Amino acid sequence: MKIFRNFVFVFSLSLLIILATVCQKTVDDQGSSTSPKGYVESADGVSIHYKTTGQGDMTLVFVHGWCADMSYWDGQIPSFKVYYQVVTLDLAGHGRSGAERSSWTIEAFAQDVVSVVERLDLQKVVLIGHALAGPVVLEAARLLPRRVIGIIGADSMSDIYLSAYSPEQIETALSPFHEDFAEGVRMYVLENYFRSTASDRIKRRIVLDMTETPADVGLGALEELMRYDATSMLQELDVPVRSINADRPLVYFRVIRKHHENFTLKFMKNAGHFMMIESPQEFNRLLAEFLGQIILESYQQ
């Protein structure tokens, strides 16, 4: 009976979030929400910028991807702050966070997330990470075993992000960025990240943001991502992992499916890499569905 009541509660909550999301008016490029903000030192002393808004028993921590910042989640905050505490942050080297770091590893970025969660003393946390931040939030969850109840990726969790590349593959992949980092990023983003449905306004905004990232940060983070192997870490996690991904061909999820038994994937049709900006209502609907699953599992434990 208790499980049934919990199921009804979670189902009703998810339905309310979906309805709020569908009804919400969205625009291509939204301004940042006004909310309490602050700074906290990461494990290596780098200053990490964060914002928090909303309220609720559970907290959603949104983590941006490579060469981006917290504003990439502005299309999610209005819908979800009604039912949850919502936290966004700038990873080191991005946005308003410090950049005094010598090694841009996935583990170091994970410590940025851990520092914010611990500073705010957050409990019942769902970590949400876009692209490179997928492995970042997986690592952070491993370091926060009593606080995190679930993980959700956004166009992440594929073998691209969770399996290590050979030195030869890394050298080949990074070569276009070495001569002119900004131009290399511009060409790569325009060729790989957008579908034909993406507006020119969104494309201009994202290209400008990403090409302004310092080359040492962008190259360092990309190289460390390509060296990263998630195999052993995935085996340590005991929380549900979900991911919302663009329906691109030849993208595989063999690593996470082999090494983590509680993984579910949903695809967004006709979505590009920045799906939460291009199609926020559909992304929010799928995110709300995954949150309902995670909350239900947390009540059953």
Image (cartoon, grey):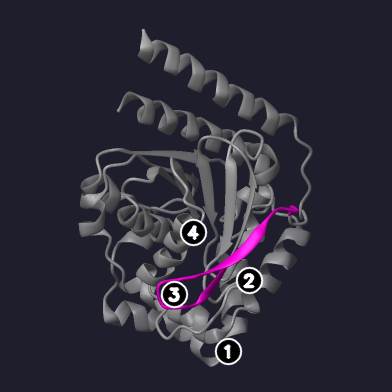
The residue wearing badge 1 is 180
Residue 229 location, quadrant: bottom left
Sequence order check, earlier mark of 3 and 2: 2
- Quadrant in which the N terminus is drawn: top left
- Residue span colored magenta: 33-48
- Judge whether 95 appears above or below 73 on screen: below
The residue wearing badge 3 is 222
Instruction: Tell me, yes or no, whether the two marked residues, 2 and 1, touch with CB atoms within 8 Å.
Output: no
Q: Measure the alpha-carbon separation of dots 1 and 4.
A: 38 Å
Q: Measure the alpha-carbon separation of dots 4 and 2.
A: 19 Å
Of marks 1 and 3, the one in the foreground: 3
**Magenta segment includes 199:** no
Q: Amino acid at mark 3?
A: Leu
Instruction: Tell me, yes or no, whether the two marked residues, 3 and 2, touch with CB atoms within 8 Å.
Output: no
Q: Residue at x 70, y 73 (%)?
A: 208
Instruction: Tell me, yes or no, whether the two marked residues, 3 and 4, touch with CB atoms within 8 Å.
Output: no
Sequence order check, earlier mark of 3 and 4: 4
User: Can I make out residue 76 in this image?
Assistant: no
The residue wearing badge 2 is 95
- Disc 4 is placed on an element classified as helix
Q: Residue at x 40, y 66 (%)?
A: 111
In the image, 223 versus 270, the foreground residue is: 223
The residue wearing badge 4 is 119
- Disc 3 is placed on an element classified as helix
In the image, 264 versus 253, the foreground residue is: 264
Residue 115 spot, x, y in % from top left: 45, 63
Q: Measure the alpha-carbon separation of dots 3 and 2.
A: 17 Å
Dot 2 crowding, Cα within 10 Å, few <14, some 14–19, many 20+? some
Instruction: Tell me, yes or no, whether the two marked residues, 1 and 4, touch with CB atoms within 8 Å.
Output: no
Instruction: Tell me, yes or no, whether the two marked residues, 4 and 2, touch with CB atoms within 8 Å.
Output: no
- Judge whether 85 appears above or below 67 on screen: above
**Magenta segment includes 37:** yes
